Image (cartoon, rainbow, N blue to C red):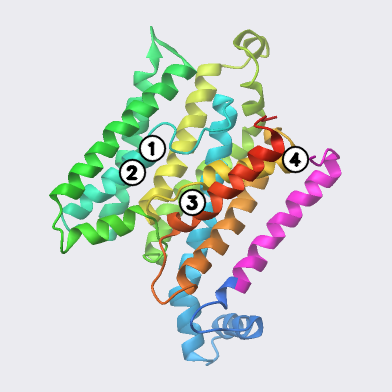
Amino acid sequence: MFITNKKLQISFILFSFIIVPVTALICLGIGRYTLSPLQILKAFGDLISGADGDVMAQTVIFKVRLPRIILAVFIGAGLACSGAAFQGLFSNPLATPDTLGVASGASFGAVFAMLFHANLIVIQFSALAFGLAACFITYKMGQVRGKQSVIMIVLSGIVVSSLVQAMVSLVKYLADPEDQLPSITYWLMGSMASANYKNLVLGLPFIVSGMIFLYFIRWRINILSLNEDEAKSMGINLQLIRLLIILASSLITASCVSMCGSVGWIGLLIPHICRMLLGSNNNTVIPLSVSLGAIFMVVIDTFARSASSAEIPVSIITAVIGAPVFIILLKKTGGVWS
């Protein structure tokens, strides 16, 4: 059962966005060095006023936890938004942000740069470039006699993703097993540990611009579920809309992977939960995916860095949680996506 009343839907979405900063504030205090909400608010107050405060608390909050929580918010929001857009675009509940091989391409770009001991900025741009290149190759391969076929695009994405994954394996084979291989392997499992303000400034504009674009054309994604003749009768240029949605979603995905590695399940699980709550209308699914994705990722990252003495890779936790939850969702819906 999902919420059908439009006013309740809007209220629920607004409430979910209010929960995002509340969750972030609570998670700022969780870790080996525990801080209360009052201590966190005081640290922010001292920073704004320029007053001397608890140096240790300010260091933990502003130099360690705040950058990675900001990153987690946008990674979760971006991947969930991208996953919702792809599922609507392909009318397929199993579509993910890596359907077109973007995440695999970005992963290859990052590990290729790491093979040559590049710094984080070079790794980030290499991942973004290769991710978008994989998307371009997939899109061109999906053309049949100058026209786009959704089935061909998906099949091309599978081929490109498999090819790029093989290239990632080759890089891991060539990497120094004592120096490079452990860092490459750890990066591929996803982590927010490398978050800093410089990386955020470089990567977040791509994620934010992609999400804003998908938000403003979210009603057009609904039209793509119609057959081609009906969509054309409404004056919609299907090829152009598909291309723009693919570019925006791929830009988000490539940017996310470039900053924190490969993080699975967010783009598949969160849109499903949103559709169970509000139905299949992308006017509500897209914004709710953004807020729930942000909340989910912040909680997961907080658990990853504080559950044990050694940080747990994020993708391990998302898979451990995502797979059982997804099975429960399928059992409840009977496998029917509406």
Alpha-carbon span between mark 1 and mark 2: 6 Å
Q: Earlier in the sequence, mark 3 or mark 2?
A: 2
Residue 53's x, y, as percent?
54, 92
- Mark number for residue 319? 3
Q: Quadrant of the N terminus?
A: top right
Q: Earlier in the sequence, mark 4 or mark 3?
A: 4
The amino acid type of the residue labelled 2 equals Ala
Label 4 element class: helix
Name the mark nearer the viewer: 3 or 2.
Answer: 3
Q: Residue at x 47, y 89 (%)?
A: 56
Q: Is residue 145 visible?
A: yes
The amino acid type of the residue labelled 1 equals Val
Name the mark nearer the viewer: 2 or 4.
Answer: 4
- Mark number for residue 41? none
Q: Is residue 267 left or right of residue 254?
A: right
Density class for disc 1 (Cα within 10 Å; few <14, some 14-19, many ≥20) is: many
Alpha-carbon span between mark 4 and mark 3: 24 Å
Tell me the magenta residue range.
1-26
Which residue is label 1 attached to?
102
Alpha-carbon span between mark 3 and mark 2: 20 Å
235 part of magenta stretch? no
Q: Residue at x 60, y 30 (%)?
A: 88
The amino acid type of the residue labelled 3 equals Ala
The amino acid type of the residue labelled 4 equals Leu
- Mark number for residue 106? 2
Label 3 element class: helix
| Quarter holding residue 223 | top right
On screen, 272 above or below 91?
below
On screen, 127 above or below 72?
above
Density class for disc 3 (Cα within 10 Å; few <14, some 14-19, many ≥20) is: some
Tags 1 and 2 touching, CB below 8 Å: yes
Q: Is residue 285 visible?
A: no
